[in-house]
Image (cartoon, rainbow, N blue to C red):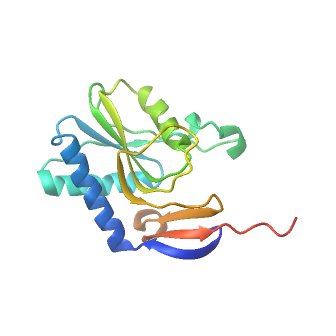
């Protein structure tokens, strides 16, 4: 983690409640699960999408298809990340033609990741609609993008960092607000 912990925003129970609420809202807004496809944006969006899928299965008794989306090559800052970016596999096991695709990510910030995910999704087919579900919306949009489903709205300053830690990726489970530490070596 880069920064000093200011506060714990969500603990494991808070994350569970937020995901449960998002799952309910997805089913309600889409009037059931017919033609739904959940797509986790790699990295932390994938376990969040899997958890949403599990809650929907408990609610509706239906297993919604789940895909994994790698947006690396769709990023508008690709040249600033690395000379040799690591590209992972995109795996969406069903056609998205005419479906309601729910993109799932951990944090919505500038909207650039969501834009890249929209571009990547459209390259895979023409869904009937695309919706966005995020665990945390921290504000500061640079693009006209908003989430359809939000676990926690968290107004932040640009100096703050929202760190989502999930058991599947980080072996810890919480959402932290960090204060960005300035590099004093310059």
Residue 133 location in percent, x, y?
37, 48
Q: Based on the displayed image, in which of its 4 quarters is residue 179 positioned? A: bottom right
Is 177 or 34 nearer to us in this picture?
Answer: 177
The residue at 22%/43% (across/down) is 29
Work out whether 172 lies above or below 47.
below
**Horizontal side of residue 59 vs 121, given as left or right:** left
The residue at 11%/51% (across/down) is 61
Work out whether 128 lies above or below 73.
above
Q: Is residue 82 visible?
A: no
The residue at 42%/32% (across/down) is 121
Residue 98 location in percent, x, y?
27, 25
Is 62 or 77 nearer to us in this picture?
Answer: 77
Residue 55 location in percent, x, y?
22, 57
Query: Which quarter of the image is occupied by the N terminus?
Result: bottom right
**Horizontal side of residue 170 vs 52, given as left or right:** right
Q: Based on the displayed image, in which of its 4 quarters is residue 122 positioned? A: top left
**Horizontal side of residue 63 vs 176, given as left or right:** left
């Amino acid at each position: 983690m880069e920064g000093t912990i200011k506060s714990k925003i969500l603990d494991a129970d808070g994350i569970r409640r937020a995901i449960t609420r998002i799952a309910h809202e997805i089913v309600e807004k889409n009037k059931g699960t017919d033609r739904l496809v959940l797509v986790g944006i790699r990295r932390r969006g994938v376990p969040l999408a899997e958890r949403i899928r599990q809650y929907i299965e408990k609610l509706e008794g239906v297993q919604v298809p789940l895909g994994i989306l790698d947006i690396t090559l769709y990023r508008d800052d690709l040249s600033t990340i690395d000379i040799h970016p690591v590209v992972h596999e995109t795996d969406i096991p069903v056609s998205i033609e005419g479906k309601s695709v729910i993109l799932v990510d951990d944090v919505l910030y500038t909207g650039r990741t969501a834009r890249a995910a929209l571009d990547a999704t459209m390259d895979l087919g023409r869904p009937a609609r695309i919706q966005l579900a995020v665990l945390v919306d921290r504000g500061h949009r640079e693009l006209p993008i908003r989430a359809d489903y939000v676990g926690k709205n968290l107004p932040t300053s640009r100096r703050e960092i929202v760190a989502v830690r999930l058991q599947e990726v980080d072996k810890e489970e919480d959402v932290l607000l960090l204060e960005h530490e300035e590099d004093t070596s310059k």
